């Protein structure tokens, strides 16, 4: 359904004064036809298919941006989890990862996601080969993103992979130490990972998806912030309604742009991910929304309740605006990408423990958090296990994107630039969970996983 004249005027205002943008148009591409007996042959097929399928993605996005005046910040591609391709040959899939990077640069996109494995219940040889190659590939590429799904409510938690990912994250940080461990900013581990998420670093083209599909992620913290500020000290019911209306408007604009892109590219429209995705810009912060609700600083008592209200209202408003809401959809709380979160960490109001509590009610998890570079791998695995357990027990997506900053201690800074932003290195509890992590095996699925 096209936008009405009133909606067009409102959208123009949101773009000009409230930082509304389309955070990403992500083209999902199936690589199932690219299996081959060697990594080199597979890499050639992958490169050719991506370049052929996505060659018009950037020009189409630019055309739509100029036509409607709504900024489209990122143009991205997601692909079938590469571990599935790696099952067809015996060597490491590094060449496929390098081919992804070359293809991304050739077509001019920002990031390409899908150097990924799904190992919630166990790992194949292809999964193992891909996971051990992640540090090498992320250190040798600029635009490749990687993700590992290692738990689900139906399968439980693969603790062998939790232990391994602690070591993989440490190795990735070390191989990219000259840039504050930026490789880890392109690596995320999941519970209940969706196959239609347009946001990086966790975007993949799920096995349940069609051949090609457009998924869209919007960014509207500034729109919601202005709505909350304009309301004043009203009761919570009215606060929820105001946020729902703002989310409705954001979603309508995002789906319109997504459907236009799908039409121009001749592919299906998939989903609209209505997550409030912040940026380091002032006025484009989820933390500032929480503070506009009445918190003196994000992280203080009441923060989790405020985030729960925000997340619920965003979902309700978005669901009214689109029949195809998907991906993650809610409120992101990445520390380095949110100016308000950074301030809260700086002043000591927002701690890792509080962030973990907040993730029980928001859309993702511990995201873009810098920790001391000397943090042991077992402690990283313990943090992963805690966060993933929240997702498994609550039947929701949770994720961890930690950056152990090489050579840096708590209170120092890492800086990545662009949307990845900068962040203070956070203090963490370094008491060791090593004996717990070393038990191995799988934490069984919870009772709520028995839904049939």
Image (spheres, rainbow, N blue to C red):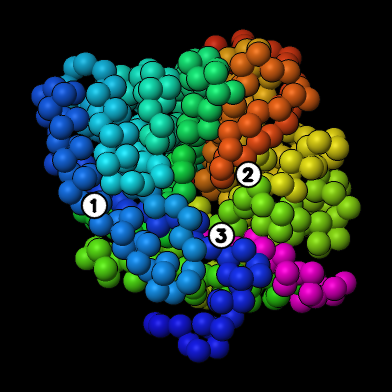
- Reply yes or no: does residue 222 show up in magenta: yes
Location of the N terminus (image quadrant) = bottom left
Q: Can you say whether 242 is above or below 368 in the image?
A: below
The residue tagged with tag 1: helix, strand or loop?
loop
* Span colored in magenta: 218-238
Instruction: Determine if residue 77 is in view.
Output: yes
Residue 256 coordinates in the image, percent (x, y): 42, 73
Left or right: 86 in relation to 304: left
Q: First in sequence, mark 3 or 1: give its number.
A: 1
Q: First in sequence, mark 2 or 1: give its number.
A: 1
Left or right: 446 in relation to 283: left
Q: Which residue is mark 2?
A: 337
Q: First in sequence, mark 2 or 3: give its number.
A: 3
- Reply yes or no: does residue 379 show up in magenta: no
Q: How many marks?
A: 3
Of labels 3 and 1, the one closer to you: 1
Q: Which residue is mark 1?
A: 55
Instruction: Determine if residue 151 is in view.
Output: no
Q: Which residue is mark 3?
A: 219
Label 2 Cα neighbours within 10 Å, binned few <14 / some 14-19 / many ≥20: many
The residue at the point 56 percent across, 45 percent down is 419
Label 3 Cα neighbours within 10 Å, binned few <14 / some 14-19 / many ≥20: many
The CA span between labels 3 and 1 is 25 Å
The CA span between labels 2 and 1 is 29 Å
The residue tagged with tag 2: helix, strand or loop?
loop
């Amino acid at each position: 359904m096209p936008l009405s004249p009133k909606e067009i005027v409102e959208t123009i205002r949101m773009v000009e004064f409230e930082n509304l943008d389309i955070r990403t148009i992500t083209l999902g591409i199936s690589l199932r036809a690219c299996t081959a007996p060697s990594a080199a042959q597979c890499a050639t097929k992958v490169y050719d298919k991506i370049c052929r399928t996505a060659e018009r993605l950037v020009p189409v996005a630019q055309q739509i941006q100029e036509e409607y005046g709504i900024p489209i910040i990122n143009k991205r591609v997601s692909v079938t989890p590469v571990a599935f391709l790696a099952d067809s040959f015996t060597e490491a899939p590094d060449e496929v990862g390098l081919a992804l990077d070359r293809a991304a640069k050739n077509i001019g996109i920002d990031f390409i996601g899908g150097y990924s494995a799904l190992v919630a219940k166990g790992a194949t040889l292809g999964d193992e080969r891909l996971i051990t190659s992640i540090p090498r590939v992320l250190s040798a590429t600029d635009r490749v993103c990687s993700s590992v799904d290692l738990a689900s409510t139906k399968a439980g938690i693969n603790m062998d992979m939790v232990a391994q990912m602690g070591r993989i994250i440490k190795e990735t940080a070390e191989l990219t130490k000259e840039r504050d461990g930026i490789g880890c900013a392109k690596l995320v581990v999941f519970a209940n990972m969706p196959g239609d998420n347009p946001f990086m670093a966790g975007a993949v083209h799920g096995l349940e998806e069609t051949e090609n599909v457009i998924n869209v992620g919007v960014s509207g913290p500034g729109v919601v912030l202005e709505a909350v500020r304009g309301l004043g000290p009203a009761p919570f019911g009215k606060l929820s309604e105001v946020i729902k209306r703002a989310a409705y408007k954001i979603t309508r604009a995002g789906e319109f742009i997504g459907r236009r892109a799908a039409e121009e590219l001749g592919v299906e429209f998939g989903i609209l991910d209505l997550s409030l995705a912040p940026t380091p810009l002032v006025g484009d912060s989820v933390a500032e929304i929480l503070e506009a609700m009445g918190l003196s600083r994000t992280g203080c008592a009441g923060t989790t309740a405020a985030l729960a209200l925000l997340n619920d209202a965003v979902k309700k408003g978005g669901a009214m605006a689109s029949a195809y809401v998907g991906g993650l959809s809610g409120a992101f709380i990445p520390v380095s990408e949110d100016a308000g979160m950074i301030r809260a960490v700086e002043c000591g109001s927002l701690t890792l423990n509080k962030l973990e509590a907040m993730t029980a009610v928001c859309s993702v998890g511990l995201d873009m958090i810098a920790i001391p570079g000397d943090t042991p791998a077992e402690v990283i695995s313990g943090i992963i296990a805690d966060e993933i357990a929240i997702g498994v027990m609550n039947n929701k997506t949770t994720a961890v994107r930690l950056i152990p900053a090489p050579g840096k201690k708590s209170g120092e800074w890492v800086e990545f630039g662009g949307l990845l932003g900068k962040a203070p290195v956070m203090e963490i509890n370094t008491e060791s969970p090593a004996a717990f992590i070393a038990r191995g095996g799988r934490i069984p699925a919870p009772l709520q996983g028995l839904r049939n």
